[in-house]
Amino acid sequence: MSKQFDVIVIGGGPGGYIAAIRAAQLGFNVACIDEWKNAKGGPALGGTCTNTGCIPSKALLQSSEYFEHAGHHFADHGIEVKGLGLDVGKMLGRKDTVVKQNNDGIVYLFKKNKVTFFHGRGSFAAVKDGIYEVKVAGTAEETISGKHIIVATGSNARALPGAPFDEVNILSNDGALRIGAVPQKLGVIGSGVIGLEMGSVWRRLGSNVTILEGLPTFLGAVDQQVAKEAHKALTKQGLKIELGVKVGEIKNGNNGVSIAYADAKGEAQMLEVDKLIISIGRTANTIGLNPQAVGLSLDERGAIVVDGNCKTNLPNVWAVGDVVRGPMLAHKAEEEGVAVAERIAGQHGHVNFNTIPWVIYTSPEIAWVGQTEEQLKAEGRAYRSGSFPFMANGRARALGDTTGMVKMLADAASDEILGVHIVGPMASELIAECVVAMEFRASSEDIARICHAHPSLSEAIKEAALAVDKRTLNF
């Protein structure tokens, strides 16, 4: 007889492991299945985010930023660095250590919350009398059963036709995090989050980086005033960003990769690089899930079809994170995982898509929540706008990092905050105040009246709120 559980979670990434923990906290007998392996073949919980995404990329971004500061900015502080060197192997080793610490942390959390973990690939086997049988294909194959199933199988990097990932010369996000030596020339196709972050890492470490983007605008989903500021800063640093290109044939050879493309003017160009990172988006991962065994519906893109509550077409089967509609963000997956566990318990879990923050961890960082000015104009909504530059912020001057600005958009009649857009130092942390404000439907006046510590970067948020009413105090 198979092992019986109240809730089975397939996938141990941010959506899955958080859903499992929350369900266990609510009193359910919970199992979580995940197949990620570490270098020794052991479990590596945390999914793409922990193993080949959010966590390792931030580790390398931090290391590369230190290297750049030591080589180019410490002198401004009176700090002399002689004989600056770079040990890429040690840098990658530190990144791997950070990843393992996160992996092990989730294993600990499962033990703490009494979540039963199965190391292997989970797939649907059958459904009988409302109970789902799930096969675990690991070192030892077994079948478990449960009443509620939460699918959190994440996403995979999308490859370009004719240019498959070999993770040696043509790289996904995974290979981009494991380049063993600084390439002299690095190409990146796609100027989204992964492309900009990985391009930034290797540019700081010494690569000549060219980014090819098919769209005619830079960061089209970002408020364009902020996007233009970011584009100016990144190109000034040395990233070469070509917009409106049409990529043609890609040849992968022994000495590198050649990319034929047409530039924005339609003129034929050729880019020769040592390594090529392809970051053109991700696709929902249902490989090996065997949805047809139980009649689980997928859409034309291969994503699992869910309603607003993450319910699938099957009773008691749910899906969260990258494998369903909505932004492919780790924190979105976490919120959906919590909400689903609470809905299973009869509570009213809720996810507000309008207040999910977005972050790009370049330098300067780019972060935003809510609507852009372009979106407000398109829907014909009357609004007021206020902005404040970091060059007028005392803490930013002390940090020596005054690039960027904070921009706040508020309803013209009610003054409710509709969107906040930041490019500048620590934008990833500053955006949290704005998320809280929007979740409680605060006005720009509310932020303007709140006392912020001085000197702090957060004062730029207050000043942007004051600017909505055209009464900034420091600019």
Image (spheres, rainbow, N blue to C red):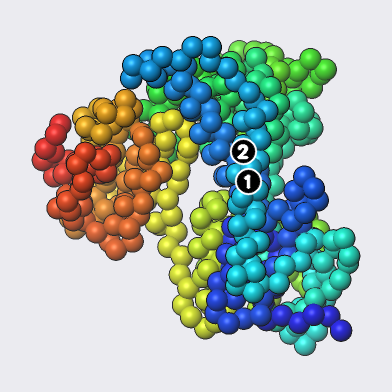
Give x and y (percent) for residue 471. Answer: 10, 40
Give x and y (percent) for residue 176. Answer: 66, 32
Give x and y (percent) for residue 49. Answer: 61, 49
In front: 213, or 274? 274
In the depicted structure, whether residue 61 falls above or below residue 182: below
Give x and y (percent) for residue 201. Answer: 56, 28
Q: What secondary structure is found at the residue carrying circle 1?
A: helix
Name the residue that disc number 1 marks: 99
In front: 340, or 181? 181
In the depicted structure, whether residue 210 falls above or below residue 447: above
Is label 2 in contact with label 1 (beta carbons under 8 Å)?
A: yes
Q: Residues within 10 Å of mark 2 (few under 14, many from 20)?
A: many
Q: Residue visible at 74% across and 19% down?
A: 257
What kind of residue is marked 1?
Answer: Val
Q: Residue visible at 77% across and 54% down?
A: 42
In front: 299, or 211? 211
The mark found on residue 247 in the picture is: none
In the depicted structure, whether residue 349 falls above or below residue 324: below
The mark found on residue 95 in the picture is: 2
146 left or right of 58 in image = right
* Image quarter (top left, top right, bottom left or bottom right) of the N terminus: bottom right
Label 2 vs label 1: CA separation?
6 Å
Q: Residue visible at 63% across and 23% down?
A: 87
Q: Is residue 428 visible?
A: yes
What kind of residue is marked 2?
Answer: Lys
336 left or right of 296 in image = left
Q: Residue visible at 36% across and 51% down?
A: 432
In the depicted structure, whether residue 197 falls above or below residue 140: above
Q: Image quarter for residue 199?
A: top right
* Image quarter (top left, top right, bottom left or bottom right) of the C terminus: top left
